[in-house]
Amino acid sequence: MTEPLVERMRGFGTTIFAEMSALAARTGAINLGQGFPDTDGPPAMLEAAVAAIMGGGNQYPPGPGLPELRAAVAAQKRERYGLDYDPDGEVYVTVGATEGIAAAVLALAGPGDEVIAFEPTYDSYAATVALAGAALRPVLLRPDGGRFTFDPAELRAAVTPRTRLILVNSPHNPCGTVFTRAELAEIAAVCRDHDLVAVTDEVYEYLTFDGAEHVPLATLPGMRERTVAVSSVGKTFSVTGWKTGWVTGPERHVRAVQTVKQFLTYATGGPWQHAAAHGLRRELAWVEDLRASLERKRDRLVGGLEAAGFTVHRPQGTYFVQADIRPLGYTDGVDLARALPEKAGVVAVPTQVFYQRPADGAHFVRFAFCKRDDVIDEAVERLTRLR
């Protein structure tokens, strides 16, 4: 019998996150692979979700999203970034950021088109581009001065007559880079010069460290009208299982996203939308405490990994640390990640799975620090066995 999966998706199997989390469950290892917190979000926000459920908000919400959440998103964009969006045409609610990105790519790129993304890329990007029938054109992020960045000349060289979109993830998963204004200006210039649309993944917008500033690409000259920004409630409020996100952008682009999304899931869970609106309006002090806590956890894990013998690139944002495995005598991250549960009782994610050419990232593994301090400490103690 022939393979039932369509040709364009045959390179995509079970996600690395599912594989590594299953490995952690099977072996009892500490899971520092998948990026989910092991503590809950703000109690009043959780109570708002319960109240919405018990108050009868359990049927289909409006397709574009509850008006209260769209208004809260528009207010957040205006108050935090000075960006004005009409909640009734320029804000659209999705089933998490992953669906928002997928709907945007499917709406704005098609067969024969090319999509530029900074590599390593979050794993859904390549799969979504393949679903659209388009081709992914990677631009490498390389370590430079303790952080990962790109060569502007390589970005410009990646553009061809077929390029339609640039996917921009900042703060960046898995590298932890927060693009500077100068780096964003290079991206914006390429978009303007070649009439490209940018789809920006900003789910870690609040989770930056050491004074690094998250600057939305849409705030740069000429970019509001050509940027579809995607964010969500999951990382900001430690409720990754709620899968509630949103896209913002010019009405014609958001309308295109809606045309696709409405035939994927139609609507997103109403109680979570109600609670997300509460969070954006009333829980940002809690988010700042979370950010500060994650910065301390980052330092805790980075220090432990360095003591265990890894070379570590200190992230400026997100949940994740990139660790170079070569000082410990390893060269293949997949092999090490699959062996780590037995060797050390810890699970990590091999970074090479986020590259078109795995060799470009074979010597890195990604560890998550969005865990309780005692979990991080136990994981670090176990990892010292590798020495």
Image (cartoon, rainbow, N blue to C red):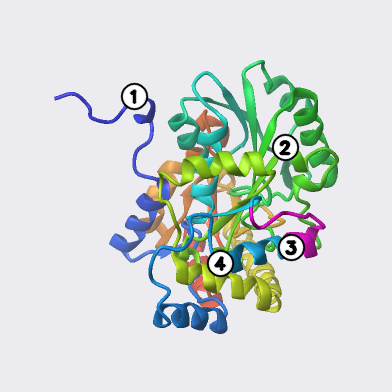
Q: State how far apart marks 4 and 1 are (Cα).
A: 37 Å
Location of mark 1 (residue): 7
Mark 2, mark 4: which one is toward the viewer?
2
Give left or right: position of 224 versus 381.
right
Quick check: marks 1 and 2 in contact, CB under 8 Å? no
N-term-proximal mark, 3 vs 1: 1
The residue indicated by pointer 4 is 370
Mark in the foreground, 3 or 1 = 1
Tell me if mark 3 has few (under 14), some (14-19) or many (20+) residues whose alpha carbon lies within 10 angstroms of its own.
many
Q: Which residue is mark 2?
A: 226
Tags 2 and 4 touching, CB below 8 Å: no
Give the residues drawn in magenta, as a range.
77-88
**According to the image, label 3 marks what residue?**
209
Question: In the rendered image, which quarter contains the N terminus?
Answer: top left
Q: Along the line of sight, which residue is nearer the eye, 119 or 251?
A: 251
Question: Residue 275 bears which disc, if any?
Answer: none
Q: Give the image location of residue 309, x and y in percent.
A: 59, 55
**In this rendering, is residue 185 above or below 208?**
above
Nearer the camera: disc 1 or disc 2 = 2
